[in-house]
Amino acid sequence: MTNRLAALPLALMLAACSVTGGGENGGAMSSAVEPSLRAAALAAEAGRDYRGAVQHLSTIYQRRPDDSGLGIALARNLRYSGQGQAAADLLQAHLARQGRDAEILLELGKDYLAADRTGLAIRTLEEARGMIPGNWEVHSTLGVALDSQGHAAEAQAAYARALEITPDNAAVLNNLGLSQALSGQLDAALATLARAADLPAATAQVRQNLALLLALKGDGAEAERLARRDLNPEQARINAEMLRALAAATRR
């Protein structure tokens, strides 16, 4: 990581040269700079500087517009930076040049979701599912899209298929638990999220979701205990007040 960050100022400076340079020397300079740009993009994405990652990746993509992996990385960082429609436009153009590609379609489905184009997201993800049925992520992402349109039973079937492929996936379990909660299956949701929270890969968001459902069930004390694990004292205080109020409301 230190080496990647150290390369960042140099990459930025040489990237500007590669855009303005011409001829064989310009091409050679661009090729020489590309590893530094890729390293800078990885470091930026890891540091959640998604706009910085987009800048680096865009420079490379201008030279390699048919590189599918690069297109996916650029679209992903556009989506992370709040530019879902720009990401979708990028991959639509890529598909027009390169033909239908399952991994491109998977990312495109996510981009459509981020752009609130849920119908297109579902159709795109269903196409990707037909091409890569053994990929858990396509099933889970399709579940999210179906949930967003209120198709809880279909969404939960998609999550179940994802869990057949990757049984102890905390992200999929989290999505399934939230889907169950939103469709009125609170006890099932609590069991699913408790299972997710016990996994080593469980994130703070999984635990916070479980705490919220515990409060909805009326167990404010356990919800507060769980919530405090990932929050600083001030956040924990505010969150505890909210959870106690929610738990009290459910007991009325």
Image (cartoon, grey):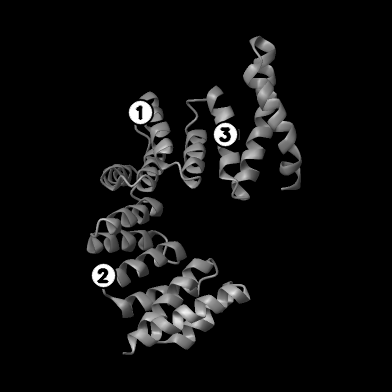
Mark nearer the viewer, 3 or 1 = 3
Image disc number at residue 183:
2
Residue named by callout 1 = 99
Rendering coords of residue 200 (x, y %): 55, 69
Label 3 secondary element? helix
Q: Is residue 49 left or right of residue 166?
A: right
Q: Are marks 1 and 2 in contact (CB under 8 Å)?
A: no
Query: Which of marks 2 and 1 precedes in the sequence?
Result: 1
Tell me the SS state at disc 1: loop
Q: Which mark identifies residue 57? A: 3
Quadrant of the image containing the C terminus: bottom left
Q: Is residue 72 left or right of residue 46?
A: left
Sequence-wise first label, 2 or 3: 3
* Amino acid residing under circle 1: Gly
Q: Earlier in the sequence, mark 3 or mark 1?
A: 3
Nearer mark to the viewer, of 1 and 2: 2
Decide: few, some or many residues near mark 1? Use Cα within 10 Å; few <14, some 14-19, many ≥20: few
Identity, as a three-letter code, of the amino acid under mark 2? Ser
